[in-house]
Amino acid sequence: MSGESEMKSQNVSKTLYIPLYGKALVSRKGIILHDPKAEHIWSREGFALTGKAKSKWLAYYMGLRSAVFDRWLAEKMRNNPEAVILHIGCGMDSRIDRVGTDGHLWFDVDFLDVITGRRKYFTEDSCYHMICSDARNTEWLQQIPSDRKALIIMEGFSMYLAKGELLSLLRSLTDHFSSVDLLMDVYTVLAARISKYKNPIGEVGVTKVHGIDDPKELLDGTCLSFVQELNMTPDDLIGELHGFENAFFRLLFAGGFSKRLYRLYEYKK
């Protein structure tokens, strides 16, 4: 890995503290997401977040986003009992605890420093495995059986890859697996453009992100088809906020402007 790439990976790795803080906060409040592991990890590892990165509004959004991913994955697992689970860019997320493997083979993938940190809090077993790798270097796929359907989560990940890198990864995934269900969140081009000035990830040193405006931009050569755009802020979960917080969150994160910046797409092969 070049010096520039290594520096980028270190900065991107720091972004894991933003959703970790959010999940720990909502769990501690008893709303949106029950995640005692996030509470525990944050109490031990918590990074000194500043500015927008420690906003309670962003924390609520991080909790909502993870809850939506959890629901999607749990449903797919029920309908595909033999599928392998692949969480790319897992950070310190404890989805493995929140959802459970239910006998599925599950792989979490992230940079070496991230997985090293995870090993202090998560234990591998016959179902659960952690892979140390830059996800773009797809040799790591050889560690995963290719003869099963793959349920793939890419949460808070795609925006750190240039479009060509993302397409290359998606092609490798669809080449490796005969059948795929994929859920990923993306920035729009507008969001990527203004992120230099408005994005909390700037607080941890990340200044370059990427966006797409049309979900079909990611179909080129990937064997994927676009299924649907999902709602990242469902009413029943926002309903766990009350009074002013409920109204303000709906305006800030569930309104039309928010949807111009951030999308959640489902794909399949």
Image (cartoon, helix red, strand yellow):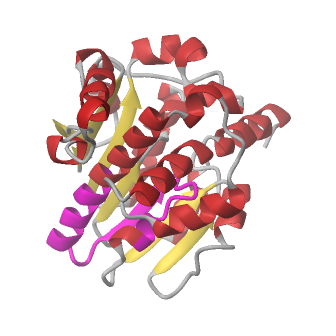
Residue nearest the viewer, comparing 142 with 7: 7
Residue nearest the viewer, comparing 215 with 256: 256
Quadrant housing the N terminus:
top right
| Residue at the limit of the structure toward the bottom, as seen here | 126
Residue nearest the viewer, comparing 268 with 11: 11
Residue nearest the viewer, comparing 87 with 28: 28
In the image, residue 33 lies at what x, y percent? 35, 58
Q: Quadrant of residue 110?
A: bottom right
Residue 145 visible: no
In the image, residue 38 lies at what x, y percent? 52, 62
Q: Is residue 256 above or below residue 164?
A: above
Residue at image location 32% in from the left, 63% down from the top: 150
| Residue at the limit of the structure toward the front, as seen here | 243
> Residue 6 colored magenta?
no
Residue at image location 55% in from the left, 33% down from the top: 160
Report the span colored magenta: 69-97
Q: Is residue 149 above or below residue 209?
A: below
In the image, residue 129 lies at what x, y percent? 53, 75
Residue 105 visible: yes
In the image, residue 243 lies at what x, y percent? 24, 34
Q: Is residue 130 above or below residue 47?
A: below
Q: Quadrant of residue 15?
A: top right
> Residue 94 colored magenta?
yes
Q: How many marks?
A: 0
Residue at image location 81% in from the left, 37% down from the top: 2
